[in-house]
Amino acid sequence: MKISLDDAIKQASSKYPEKNRFDRNRYAHLCIGAKVIEYLPENGSILDIGSGPCEAAGVLALLGYEVSACDDLSDYWHLYGDNRRKITEYATKVGVNFSEVYGKFSNEVKKKIPGANKNPNFWASGISVVMHMNNPYVPAIHFNTRFIYTTHGWFGGGMDVTPCIVDNKEKTFLHKELKKMCDRHNKKYYKKYKKWCDEYFYLPHRKETRGIGGIFFDYKKDNWEKDFKFISDLGVTFQMLFNSIIKIKYKKKWTVKQKEIQYIKRGRYAEFNLLYDRGTKFGLQTGGNVEGILMSLPPIAKWN
């Protein structure tokens, strides 16, 4: 660790907008930090769902972990005065990725968003994971869930896989597990959301799909509790799938030629995200964090 747990708590406390909050919760932070250090390797990644005001997330980020936090910040004291802004500014300073945007849609944007014509005010939060692996045998993997509220709220999201080296066994495994997950909630979901994914992740100027598909959905507002269970199940399934795929392939030897193929495939990925992706457009049009919005782009890409 770059610094000790005790020093991380002190640093986080000195930057936190509410005085004495860390003093009241010091024992909890010591316990959480000690368990994370015990079980998670240095420089590991943490997704803190229901993070609250990012106290624990801030300590873990200062310890050197890559931390992403998600919370609606709707408790009374979060909403009091200027506390929301102070919390998100604190999170950014200590290295936590926090996804939340709210405000008013512009006249141009509100025409395209359900419920926004009646009232342009909105709130949105989401979790987005994009992995561009060094090894060309390991595919690019994308997972996203979001909740948007205008005059009504809905879920959207999905996951898809983009290999640069075709593996039919991997494709069969992916779709088998996604169908199994969808069927637990509704037998019609898989066929509907797979088709939506194939149509959405398509590059018309190339006349090709981005990858081997997955599932994609939007404007999901049937029943909040059931929809949330589906979203949660998708997150668990995503974790299982990417763990399985990476474990099988990350040690495979690759050639310079295969690396060049990967760079070209990454170029296609970048084209889709910059030209067609609705999430990218939404984030840029609503004043989101530009670096966070463009984190889906690969680190290196090439074009013929």
Image: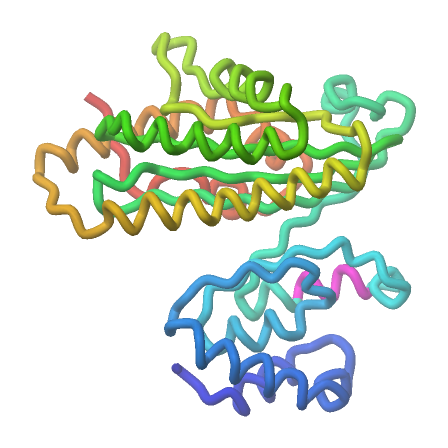
Q: Is residue 93 above or below residue 294?
A: below
Q: Which of 58 and 133 is in front in this view?
A: 133
User: Which of the 4 quarters of the picture holds residue 218?
Assistant: top right
Q: Is residue 254 magenta?
A: no
Q: Where is residue 231 in the image (x, y as percent from the top left)?
A: 65, 40
Q: Position of residue 209 (x, y in %)?
A: 39, 17
- Left or right: residue 294 compared with residue 250: right
Q: Nearer the viewer, residue 205 or 233?
A: 233
- Left or right: residue 183 compared with residue 199: right
Residue located 44% across and 81% down the image: 38
Residue located 38% across and 50% down the image: 243
User: Which of the 4 quarters of the picture holds residue 211?
Assistant: top left
Image quarter in which the C terminus is found: top left
Residue located 16% across and 47% down the image: 252
Q: Nearer the viewer, residue 124 or 48?
A: 48
Span highlighted in magenta in the image: 83-89
- Left or right: residue 269 compared with residue 11: left
Q: In this view, does 248 lie above or below 267?
A: below
Q: In this view, does 294 lie above or below 91?
A: above
Image quarter in which the N terminus is found: bottom left
